[in-house]
Amino acid sequence: EVQLMESGGGLVQPGGSLRLSCAASGFTFSVFGMNWVRQAPGKGLEWISYISPTSMTVNYADSVKGRFSVSRDNAQNSLYLDMNSLRDEDTAVYYCVRQFDNNGHYVPYFQHWGQGALVTVSS
Amino acid sequence: EIVLTQSPVTLSLSPGDRATLSCRASQSVDNYLAWYQQKPGQTPRLLIFDATHRATGIPARFSASGSGTDFTLTISSLEPEDFAVYYCQQRSSWPPLTFGGGTKIEIK
């Protein structure tokens, strides 16, 4: 069974930093692209970052580019999101999400989601 | 950036009704569109991929159509568990991967 478990959320002041982690299990982590998707309270879904299986390709939404950094450790089956210069509008639940496996063809839809980590940016 | 516009924002229906949800893209996404369902307090669930294909385990009452810029998700007969928020998402041109704003199906 695919499992994704985020940790590291919490309350942080504007301008502060936080690191989210995602522990993956139940699948071969090293072959899947991984994403971070966030959802502000009562709002819709926003993709914020992608990292390819070998970390060769990383992408960010404009809203977080230059402030957030995604990384992974395939040996530890772990995904990370380093968040700096946090703003009030970054307050959201952050989901670690695995790419969709269409019979061995991995495509950027979102198939498996962690339960999310709440990040609250407030003074 | 491809913008996805979903309509209506809210759909008020009764169990057994047919639901028709729309997703319109600001430019062609070919058939590279997915639909998700999110129930309160739960994570989103992938329903449809590549515009028309049901994901594993999705009931047959969910169907979808469209290509290019106009897409439709249809629920043929609403079950109580189908009252939720539905999102579309494109993978045609990215980054960024983008979602629509969502359609909420509520009980009338």
Image: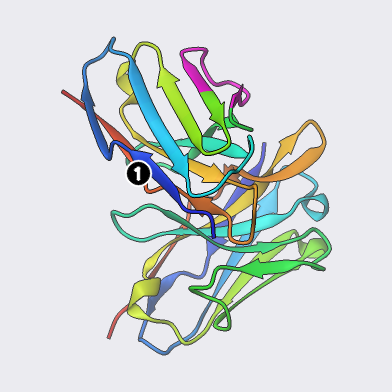
**Which residue is tagged 1?**
B41
Q: Which residue is at 37% across, 48% downward? A: B101
The secondary structure making up most of the magenta span is: loop
Q: Please state, as top left, top right, bottom left or bottom right, where the N terminus of chain A lies in the image.
A: top right
Figure check: B82 above or below A42? above
Q: Which residue is at 47% across, 56% downward? A: A116
Left or right: A117, with B105 as reference point: right
Residue closest to the eye, B28 or B105: B28
Figure check: B61 above or below B97? above
Residue closest to the eye, B55 or A121: B55
Q: Which residue is at 59% across, 24% downward? A: B52
Figure check: B80 above or below B101? above
Q: Which residue is at 75% across, 58% downward? A: A77
Left or right: B61, with B53 as reference point: left
Quarter of the image for residue A16 reads: bottom left
Looking at this view, name the residue that lies furthest to the bottom.
A15
Q: Locate residue B76, reporting x and y percent.
A: 40, 12
Figure check: A123 above or below B105? below
Q: Locate residue B30, reporting x and y percent.
A: 64, 38
SS state under label 1: loop
The magenta stretch is B52-64
Q: Locate residue B44, reporting x and y percent.
A: 47, 41
Q: Which chain carries label 1?
A: B
Q: Locate residue A51, reporting x and y percent.
A: 71, 63
Q: Does the magenta stretch include residue B17?
A: no
Q: By what rule are the colours in the image chosen?
A: rainbow
Q: What's the residue type where badge 1 is placed?
A: Gly
